[in-house]
Image (cartoon, rainbow, N blue to C red):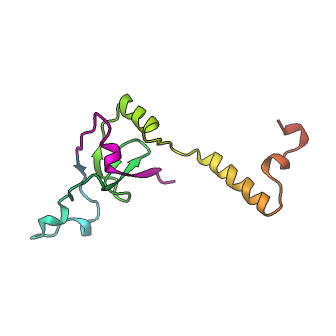
Amino acid sequence: MPEYQKAYHLNQLRRFPGWIETRVWEEPKDPQRMAQPGQPEARRPEELTDESIVYMQENLTVSESCFDTGRTIFDRITPEWEDFCRNELHFVVPDWEEESRIAREASAKREGGSTEEEAKPDSARA
C-alpha cells in the first residue's frame, strides 16, 4: 500500500518556528524525465509561494509533489515538528484496519446484512 500523504498550503507549514526549506532533489530514475541538453530549465525547481500546495508524507517529511517524493522540501524531523504536525496541523495517519471495519459495517447496514459484531457467535461478543 502506498504511503499516506496529505496536502497543505505551504503557508500552513511555514508557521512552524523551525521551518527551513531544504529543497533536496534526487535525480529522477526515468531518463525521459531528466533535462535534455540545451534545456537546463527543465529541472529547475519552481518558486514556492505561501499558496503552493505541498505534501506531508507519512514519515513527516514534506514533498513538493505527491507523485515524486524525491522532491523533498523539508526533512528535519524533530520532536517539536512532530508536535506541530499533530497539534497544529492535526496530521494523523489513518488506522486503515479501523477505516475498513467501519466501511464494511456501513455497507452491511445499507444492504440489510449483519455487521461483524452481529456475525460473531454469542460466546465471542464483548
Q: Which residues are magenta?
A: 1-22
> Which of 92/67 is in front?
92
Is 37 located above or below residue 115 in the figure? below
Q: Quadrant of residue 38?
A: bottom left
Q: Observer-nearest residue: 126 or 14?
A: 14
Q: Residue at x 35, y 31 (%)?
A: 78
Name the quadrant containing residue 12: top left
x and y percentages locating residue 2 in the rendered image: 48, 54
Instruction: Pick the residue in front: 5 or 11.
Output: 11
Looking at the image, is 13 positioned above or below residue 77?
Answer: below
Quadrant housing residue 20: top left
Instruction: Give x and y (percent) for residue 60.
Output: 39, 41
Magenta highlight on residue 72: no
**Figure quadrant of the C terminus:** top right
Which residue occupies the extreme top position in the image?
79
Q: Residue at x 36, y 30 (%)?
A: 80
Residue 8: in magenta span = yes
In this figure, what is the number of numbered marks?
0
Where does the image place residue 36, in percent across and percent down from the top left? 16, 70
Q: Residue at x 28, y 34 (%)?
A: 18
Horizontally, is 124 left or right of 89 in the view?
Answer: right
Q: Residue furthest right?
A: 122
In the displayed structure, 80 sits above or below 51; it is above
Name of the residue lying farthest toward the left: 38
Q: Position of residue 98 (x, y in %)?
A: 65, 46
